[in-house]
Image (tube, rainbow, N blue to C red):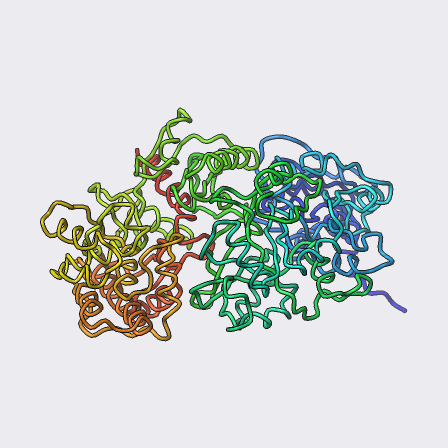
Amino acid sequence: MTVVPTPDTFAPAARLFLKVNGAVQGVGMRPFVHRLATDCGLTGYVRNGADGVTIEVEGVRVEEFARRLNSEAPPLARIDTILRENMPVTGDTEFVIRESLDGETMTRIVADAATCNACLAELFDPTSRYFSYPFVNCTHCGPRYTITRRLPYDRRQTSMASFPMCPDCAEAYTDVRDRRFHAEPVACPACGPQLSHPIAEIATAIRSGCIVALKGIGGFHLVCDGRNAGAVSELRARKAREFKPFALMVANAASISEVADASSEELNLCSSTARPIVLMQAKPGVLAPAVSPGLSRVGVMLAYAPVHHLLFAALANHDFAGHDPHTPNDFVLVATSANPGGEPLVVDDEDAMRRLAGIADLIVTHDRAIVVRADDSVAQIIAGAPSFLRRARGYVPEPIAFAEDGPATLALGAHLKSTVTLTRGREAFVSQHVGDLDTAETLKFYRETIAHLIDIVGVQPELIASDLHPDYRSSQMADEFGLPVVRVQHHAAHVAAVAAEVGLDGPALGLALDGHGLGDDGGAWGGELLAVDGAKHRRIGHLASLPLPGGDRAAREPWRMGVGALAALGRADLAPVLFPDRTLAGPIAERIVSGADRLSTTSLGRLFDAAAALLGVRTVQDYEGQAAMELEALVDQPVAFSGGFVLDDGVLSFAPLLAHFALARPDARTGASLFHGTLIEGFAALARHGATATGLTAIALGGGCLMNRVLAEGLSAALVQSNLTPLLARRLPANDGGLSFGQAVLARRAFSET
């Protein structure tokens, strides 16, 4: 037989240096490189460093290796750049993995990932040494960010450092043929972390109606039977959380149909390695009524850690041996963050005993420390694609790219739904959700988050960005760093965040629709049409002002906004009629008419409150955005009320619609549909006004009101019909959770323009 040589058969050996940057640590990159080099018959080395993965390969097929390095990378890897340089041939005789190097951090670690199918198979295989082990993981799954103190990503830099590997795990760790080759969290029952209670005991407690505090990947969950009305109501009472919806956890995608009607996009999002909570249409009559009171959708996530899969098997009375974790399971768990009284998520065992003892009947811990708190991420599908309500576990610290370099900037975010952003060159690292900066515990977590982000990104900030509002705790902290501070207007940051996220270069036009932000004129803004150009912005249009009786109290008591709307309409006489249980309604209306109460706002969030109050949907809020969420839940199909708004020289008033609510008093469902339909039509008209005034046709849609799916989808469609291009937040929340990113964008521009 004649062998026809391939083109490379007689090619001379070459040596190639490669530097791989991106999310390339903790994903099995080094074992992958080792296997690929061996397959290509090459010698050389690979090693981790703080600035990425360094490779030198030598042999005939180095170009094939370079091509396959990018195209066949491990599933969790995110390669940004591969720098290459030809090197002199050295005559190496083998390919080795060298010891990692410390230094200036320029790489990054990936987010935590749900248990992969290979590990699940071992979890329920009685012949595997990982059988029923609640901490099984490999290079393709398991904790990453939440256990890592700093880079490079090696076991000694994680909370697994206190668990020396047993001989079997050490063998797997050093065997290039093993899936756990250099898997830093590798462990087994003989050497790894342990749960404080058996799975069977946890399942028994839940079946009997108990509330369990269960330590997981990024913190503790409070868990109970989602079909047990008594257990769910008791959890509400103990947590002092009367109405805010609880998230649910089900065993797998096949089990979602037990509780919700999910679209294919929602199923795909639920099943991603990030395993976020996904909002979807709840099935009526299945869940305990207290799970999601007043709302039509429910947040559902799939089991994502081995302990969850074991628990669902036990709840279904299945033996672990041979259990198939992908088959339908009709057990549904409430799984809500364990954070009493609005404080941050509990992560420490001793802290759990102290803070959760009055809530949970059983507290289940484990001895692997959680280095970084990370709540479950929350997302929904808007206009066919994912959109965040909260970005944390499973996504952080994936960065967002800038178009150009700039100073290392630490942006401190807002007061509510706070995050921080740290930039490094052309990358912006947005932290996990921190929460509202109202308590000492949350402020402590906020400072921890800043310190850890600096450690994990490996840069010291040169510039601080904060909100314009002087009363925000985040703004007050800005001067502590002793660095230049750029104060950024709240709504300009919302517009800049969305525009920069999608890579829009040049000037941007945007609608910033939210609850509150300090305006350039010192007023309370929140329904703004802004043009942002470089670091500067100008107000092109806005919502007409409404009275804001009681200031911040109006955000908690929508009846006050209803009274304010009546006074603005010249119908103060209706205040005691429409709000008979509020003895202050009449006097407040009179104060507004007399000019004694001059506070006002252009906030869309407060307009939602006014509409909800006038329609009798909600007069007092138990949690932020409750009135707006309940109003959205009533919408069957948005329908515009004819003549329901007036647009005059960029000022958009919905006074005609509010008058209709006050005088005609439609039922709540009809009113909710009219309100949303008229908002969509009115803001589309305002956007057209802005496009005509500026010549800009792409409209960034930012602010907390864009969490409203009916509004966001309807407004997007209306803009398309007007030959405008809607830009929606996809990689960050449109609410204040994405604000720090917008602050960083504008602060870096301001710095470069000085």
Q: Residue furthest left?
A: 594
Report whether 425 appears left or right of 254. Answer: left
Q: For the point 32% across and 40% down, which residue is it? A: 488
* Image vertical order of residue 718 relative to residue 144, above or below: below
Residue 501 picture location, percent across and down: 42, 52
Taking the image as drawn, is residue 291 in sight?
Answer: yes
Q: Quadrant of the C terminus?
A: top left
The answer, for residue 511, to whether it is visible in the render is: no
Q: Quadrant of residue 168?
A: top right
Residue 629 coordinates in the image, percent (x, y): 39, 61
Instruction: Name the quadrant containing residue 639.
Output: bottom left
Image-based side of 242 in relation to 332, left or right: left
Q: Nearer the viewer, residue 514 or 7?
A: 514
Q: Is residue 754 above or below residue 496?
A: above
User: Percent position (x, y) of residue 514?
Assistant: 32, 53
**Residue 75 x %, y %:** 65, 56
**Residue pictured at 47% horizontal, 47% vertical:** 401
**Quadrant of the image for the N terminus?**
bottom right
Foreground of the two, 676 or 631: 631
Q: Is residue 323 left or right of residue 544?
A: right
* Left or right of residue 146: residue 697: left
Of residues 358 and 141, the one nearer the viewer is 358
What residue is at 54 percent from the left and 48 percent from the top? 375
- Front residue of this view, candidates 403 and 242: 242
What residue occupies the far right of the structure in this picture? 1
